[in-house]
Image (tube, coloured by chain):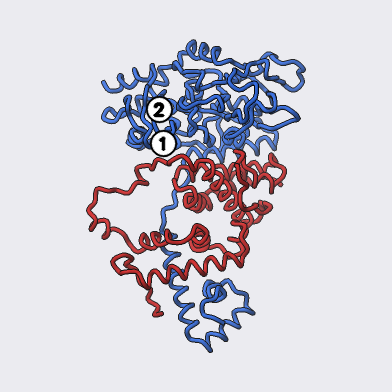
Chain colours: A red, B blue
Amino acid sequence: MTLPPATDIRGLLDRYERPLIRYAQSIVGDLESARDVVQDAFIRYVRLTSGEEDAPMQAAHSSTEDAEEPASAVPPALNANDARHIEAWLFTVTRNRALDHVRKYSRIVAMPMPEERVCEDRRPDEVLESRDEAEWLLKLLDGLTPNQREVIRLKFQNDLSYQEIADITGLSATNVGFLLHVGLKKLRTILREAPLDEFPIRLRTAP
Amino acid sequence: MKTDDPILTAYALGELPAGERASIEQLLREQPQAGTEISETREIAGILRDALHAEPAPPLAEHQRWAILRMAEAVQREARGVPARERDVVEPAWWGRVGVWQTIAACAVFGFGIYAFSVSLTKPSPSVGRTLGPEDMVVTVPGEAVPAVPGAPEILTPAELQQRMVAAGGPGVDAGKVFPNGALIVPPQLAGAVRIEAPQGTISTTAGNAAPASGVVRVTRENERTVISILDAARIARDGIGYATLPDVRKPAVVGSNQTSANASIGLAAAKPPSDEVFGTYLLQRMSEAERVREGSTAADFSKVFRADPKVPDRYEMIRCRSIKVDAKFEGGDGTAKSSDARVKTISRPYLDVFQEGAK
């Protein structure tokens, strides 16, 4: 396998670094760890496409940190000429590395950075006013299981298909569909039944 | 078909093939409630899509991106048989420039903290608790049959390392904690791959993410020995390998506390640290008089100091700076710099002097 030109690496970074960091952050919790994870995924991509790692599946799947548990999804074979393969590979490796990170550093309490901290200087009413619909909805996601949250993020944040999500997570496409179905249903129920002052979002569609 | 069926959700999200879509459309004609389900699913999907797309999506830090591009370029050059340039791919911002990082990283390594990789004593053995000395390792340069060939890495004991640091004008690090098993000093003139073998069962890699990932070293097991292969000594000397991801900075060893006999580290060090003058200038540029770090400072104070400087791009660099600047020992918490309740117990000279100088 030949290494794509550096300009292509740059293109990959332009296209995927932000979605991958956002995805990694949803797993590891803090931005800087997410950045580390994604940098590592790209470095592995470079090494793999350069032939420095000659066993794509193993190389992408393995952890250099001797994770105590195996990562949950085996990345697909990397075809550097196929953008969808690259995307799936990067997401899968990012996910595995993020899970490794969580396992490794779970005992360490992350210190939130200033921009990650909630500003407590505002009055409650100011806080309420400043939160828009998107923030409320993201808050709703906390009520879902981690699996449901993950497939919802992959589906609606990254516009991936059931099959692509299945490839990344190691779940079956049927299972992905089920998780999405249950997760969306739960969100709809919350929006229908929760007090308006608690979740000021309502579906326009009548039940 | 029930209206509470994942297949309706799949239909609403456009996931069904044509054949199955037709059957759902037939169902919609027969069961209007199914249509409501689908409409509601599409509405919540639209809201979610908007909300999740609006979520902040920050990029990599510039030096991280630079490191990836640089590595890709280096690999390409190697593939074409072209020697690596001193600087390639991109001209990063000031914090990504080679000279700056060389200075920072080399000093950090000598100071006590940027580890190329770490090895842990994972199970009790006769070696635990004693220094892993030269007699435990074999250094091999390809084409040479004997260790200790000119230009090979030096293996230093903690005492030797301490002497070397002091002689180089570096900080008075407690080498027994920071480099409990000594250090490998890699000379810049070293060419070609070098193997360093250590007895099996004595060391095993645990967090060797950074350096292996950057192609600088590789750690493998061969027969009864652990083999550390230095692949790019020139890069170690030039860059201090400081630009790669370094999970070790979160380990207690980095801040010099809670080091136990069960954990030990070997540092790959650049051969020449920067002068105190260069180093001190760098620090003073980043210190704020109002928020300088003192003994008793918390980890959060460290954040504030470095976050107060808009030129510091992210926490990654902050941690690096912390490693460089604050030769500090923490107490409380779990002893790591990330522990929110850890406090600085001591700050070693000459850095305290630098702080005081910066406050004038």
Residue B51 screen position, x and y as percent: 41, 62
Which residue type carries mark 1? Ser
Spatial CA distance of label 1 from label 2 is 9 Å
The image quadrant where one finds the N terminus of chain B is: bottom right
Which residue type carries mark 2? Phe
The image's mark for residue B339 is 1
Neighbour tally class for label 2: few under 14, some 14-19, many 20 plus, Cα within 10 Å: many
Instruction: State whether residue B99 appears in this view.
Output: no
SS under mark 2: strand
Q: How many marks?
A: 2
Instruction: Tell me, yes or no, whether the two marked residues, 1 and 2, touch with CB atoms within 8 Å.
Output: yes
Residue under the image location 50 percent in, 41 percent down: A105
Residue under the image location 58 percent in, 24 percent down: B266
Neighbour tally class for label 1: few under 14, some 14-19, many 20 plus, Cα within 10 Å: many
Instruction: State whether residue B316 appears in this view.
Output: yes
The part of the image, by quadrant, that contains residue B47 is bottom left
Residue under the image location 56 percent in, 40 percent down: B68
Q: Which residue is mark 2?
A: B330
Residue A145 screen position, x and y as percent: 48, 60
Residue A176 screen position, x and y as percent: 57, 64
